[in-house]
Image (tube, helix red, strand yellow):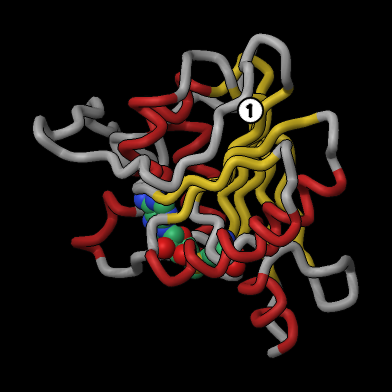
């Protein structure tokens, strides 16, 4: 086990914790559709583009910050994409409550908050107890794309997802300005100021 890999306590939602669902749109029929999930979608740049480009798939995109979610929802209302479900909630609670086991084919965690302080470690997605529920919702063979501009974070996430959670590491690639149209607003910001970003791709065995 390397220094990054840690056991993560089982997830248990605190009793009485309310999962806000007021703005949740209709969920897809998981048996009939290929369903993907984005955690922390911000103002929805990736989610809106992805839904337009993948009409045969359905994306559930979750954001907890009120202002960001409102911006996302306004854009969603204008575009009326039937294969996108914006969810205003804490994804770590929502997934446990609403996603059936093995229902998600692709999971996107794009430029998550790094929570760099040691005492914030269990707020990073790969160390969250909620990752138990999130991986339960992923189909065997399901894929994860995790993006960040921080080398230490991509190294840590790669080690924990593979050594701690047992995922197959598919690739880690550097992304530089001009390599592709920016996936998200944060990616755009980082690349335009000359930083290198990282794409970490993983796969749930099976
Ligand atoms: C650094 S921003 C990146 C936003 C977007 N993915 C992008 O790249 O432009 C991280 C986002 O994750 C959201 N977030 C953090 N924890 C979350 C949680 N538990 N559930 C839902 N959203 C969360 C934050 O509110 C924030 O908007």
x and y, in percent, of residue 178 in the image: 89, 76
Q: Is residue 35 left or right of residue 8?
A: right
Q: In the figure, residue 93 lies in which quadrant?
A: top left
Q: Nearer the viewer, residue 110 or 171?
A: 110
Across the whole image, how many numbered discs are drawn on residues?
1
Residue at screen point 55% across, 47% down: 86
In this view, 174 is above or below 202: below
x and y, in percent, of residue 162 in the image: 53, 33
Kindly tell me whether residue 151 is visible in this rendering.
no
Q: In the figure, residue 43 lies in which quadrant?
A: bottom right
Kindly tell me whether residue 104 is visible in this rendering.
yes
Q: Is residue 42 left or right of residue 12?
A: right
x and y, in percent, of residue 198 in the image: 68, 61
In this view, 206 is above or below 104: above
Q: Secondary structure at mark 1?
A: strand
Residue that label 1 marks = 168
Residue at screen point 77% across, 49% down: 50
Figure quadrant of the N terminus: top left
x and y, in percent, of residue 48 in the image: 72, 55
């Amino acid at each position: 086990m390397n220094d990054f890999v840690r056991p993560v306590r089982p997830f248990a939602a605190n009793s009485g914790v309310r999962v806000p669902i007021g703005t949740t749109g209709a969920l897809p029929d998981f048996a009939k559709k290929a369903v993907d999930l984005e955690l922390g979608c911000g103002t929805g740049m990736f989610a809106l583009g992805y839904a337009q480009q993948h009409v045969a798939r359905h994306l559930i995109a979750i954001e907890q910050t009120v202002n960001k979610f409102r911006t996302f929802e306004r854009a969603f209302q204008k575009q009326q994409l039937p294969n996108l479900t914006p969810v205003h909630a804490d994804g770590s609670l929502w997934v446990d409550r609403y996603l059936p086991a093995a229902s998600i084919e692709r999971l996107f965690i794009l430029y998550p908050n790094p929570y760099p302080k040691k005492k914030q470690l269990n707020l990073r997605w790969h160390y969250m107890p909620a990752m138990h529920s999130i991986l339960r919702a992923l189909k065997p063979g399901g894929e994860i794309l995790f993006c960040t501009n921080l080398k230490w974070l991509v190294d840590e996430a790669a080690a924990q997802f593979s050594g701690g959670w047992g995922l197959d590491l598919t690739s880690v690639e550097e992304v530089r300005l001009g390599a592709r149209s920016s996936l998200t607003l944060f990616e755009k910001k980082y690349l335009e100021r000359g930083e290198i970003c990282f794409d970490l791709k993983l796969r749930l065995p099976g």
